Image: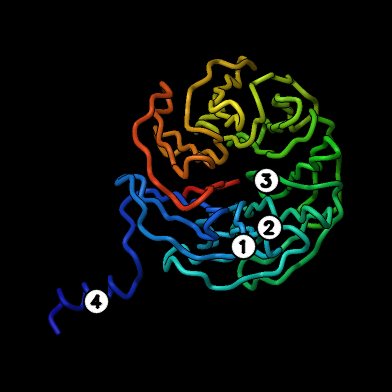
Amino acid sequence: MSRRVALLLAAALAGPAVAGPLAWITNQGSNSVSIVDLDAAKVMREIAVGKSPAGIAVSPAAGRAFVTNPGDNSVSVIDLREQRIVDTVRAGQGAVGVAAAPDGGAFFVADWYGGALRAFDAKTLGETGRVQVGTSPAGVTVAPDGKTIYVAARDDDEIVEIDRSTLAIRARIKVGEHPFAVELAPDGKLLLALNVISNDVSIVEVSTRKILATLPVGLAPYGVAFSADGARAWVTLQHAERVAEIDLRGLKVAATHATAPYPEGIAIAGSTLLVVSWMDDLLVLHDAATGKRRAEVSTGSNPRAFGRFVQP
């Protein structure tokens, strides 16, 4: 066998080649995940998962994507390199939000009907603990240093702060009405709670747990993404067909941009803002600086992509 043939064979056996960033889009209606090549603006592959997938946590550190399936109370675990399901984990009574630890050692699932946060080992996939957090927990995020977990207890109007090592509750932070998503700025200093009933965003200073601002943004804020420097945040507005752009240094809404109907998941990849349209079955690519639509990609049915869905 020639050296060239051997190298080609090794590359083929290594799994799918990845030229640029990928977006992993959960499709609630078609019970699947669409893998989108963002450089090419096209779907590379669609993977069948559990029933009514919603939340996702792509973890390069773990080499896996964790997909919540509220319809059958499970988490589908996908190998990022091989792009295939390696296992399915039972996760309480309605798995919704999911987040992975930055070190890739664990992932955490919001158990909507069980009122709990469940912790899992990202390698063995065994459940390592759980804590009751309140009514209808939804969004989950983990601090950049990996020491703290935050959960949105939607129907209690609270963000619950949890010690990762012990799963003990440290604090409960009152925010607006029905926070669904919760996310941290890249440096971990600010936390945003998206309040779907009061139509505003609570900006929390993590070190003091104080509300720095409550910003009206529009109807039904759902998902949030941050610029790499943490100066800006973009929030999808489900019932307004728009994205609100927040100036985090000035603590104000800087602009709003039109997008596709019923936007849910949102992320940043370089200079591109990615918005998932539940209504139109689309991933819409916008210029992050101007909000101008660059391209769109057809996905599966009723995409949601609630969580961190970009693989760099």
Amino acid carrying mark 3 in the image: Thr
Residue at (69%, 19%) from the top-left corner? 215
- Residues at badges 1 and 3 in contact (C-beta under 8 Å)? no
Quarter of the figure with residue 151:
top right
Mark nearer the viewer, 2 or 4: 2
Amino acid carrying mark 4 in the image: Leu
* 28 sits to left or right of 172: left
Amino acid carrying mark 1 in the image: Lys
Identify the residue under disc 1.
51
Query: Which quadrant, please, contains the N terminus?
Result: bottom left
Q: Residue 70, labelled with which disc?
A: 2
The image shows residue 38 at horizontal and vertical percentages of 36, 45
* 35 sits to left or right of 220: left
Mark 2 and mark 3: span between their CA atoms? 18 Å
Mark 1 and mark 3: span between their CA atoms? 23 Å
Which numbered disc, 2 or 1, marks the residue that appears first in the sequence? 1
- Residues at badges 2 and 1 in contact (C-beta under 8 Å)? yes
Disc 4, SS: helix
Identify the residue under disc 3.
141
Residue at (30%, 53%) from the top-left corner? 19
Residue 299 or residue 247, whichever sits in front = 299
